[in-house]
Image (tube, coloured by chain):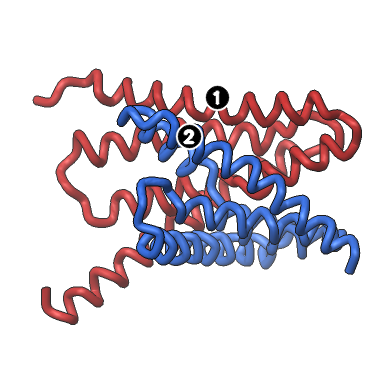
Chain colours: A blue, B red
Amino acid sequence: MSAWAWIGVALLGGVGALARFGLDGLVQRRAGGELPAGTLAVNLTGSFCLGLLTGLAVTGDALLLAGTAALGSFTTFSTLVLETERLGEDGRGRLALLNLGLSLAGGLAAAGAGWALGAAL
Amino acid sequence: MAPHHARRERRGLLLAVFAGGIVGTLARAEVARLLPASGDAWPWATFAVNCAGAFLIGLLVTRLQERLPPARFGRPFVGTGLCGALTTFSTFQVEILRIAHDGHVLLAAGYLVASVATGLVLVYAATAAVRRVRLT
């Protein structure tokens, strides 16, 4: 990988994290509630977009920059499991399960929809 | 808070997320380069970064919230930025679909369940380890 590609990965990774921070805050403020809706919104949106890139058969440096760097950083697994574990700790096991279920079923559905759309374009 | 203080606070917060995001993404990209995914096999690179990130976020966020003096930019840097970007959900989901699409439905289901179960156990274990250290 070229030095330019690494610089691009670094910058897009930073931007992806900032975009996650922004969308998470926006959705969480609007949604209120105890469900971590911000992380859910980020992960479903990002899964759809990566599915779309996959369906469009994007490869090489383009996939590295848009997929691995930007969308990889935009979506998060660590915050999902942290928030789910904290809900469980607080005795909100059903909400924790709901969060996991919505994230996984929604994420797979979103990625699949993006993939199908990309393949059809 | 005076407006210029709020602005400076906001700028510091965004810079912490951005910087953490750069470090986390570079680490994940490097692991992905070292352990390239092959179509029908267990995605070790994503599994490794997601497990590492789950353990780290449990460790660092618990320490920041319950053990260390308040730090304004600690959580944005290590939690949102570093661990958030080190781990990935979108790649995880697309990998599951790809493995299932290639006909390895059991492998796909096993990868999903193992990732989530291991992630939760690691957050729990890291949190418990931090809390076992008494406050002095």
**Residue A77's disc number:** none
**Residue A115 relative to residue B59: left or right:** right
Q: Quadrant of the N terminus of chain A?
A: bottom right
- Residue farthest to the top, as pictured: B132
Q: Position of residue B81 (x, y in %)?
A: 44, 53
Q: Which residue carries the number 1 mark?
A: B118
Q: Name the residue located 69 percent from the left edge and 57 percent from the top edge.
A: A48
Q: CA distance from mark 2 to mark 1?
A: 9 Å
Q: Name the residue located 87 percent from the left edge and 39 percent from the top edge.
A: B101
| Quarter residue A103 falls in | top right
Q: Name the residue located 90 percent from the left edge and 32 percent from the top edge.
A: B103
Q: Position of residue B31 (x, y in %)?
A: 65, 41
How many residues crowd mark 1 within 10 Å: few (<14), some (14–19), many (20+)?
some
- Residue farthest to the bottom, as pictured: B3
How many residues crowd mark 2 within 10 Å: few (<14), some (14–19), many (20+)?
many
Do labels 2 and 1 touch, CB within 8 Å? yes
Which amino acid type corresponds to the residue marked 2 in the rendered image? Ala
- Residue farthest to the left, as pictured: B136
Q: Position of residue B64 (x, y in %)?
A: 26, 41
Q: Which residue carries the number 2 mark?
A: B54
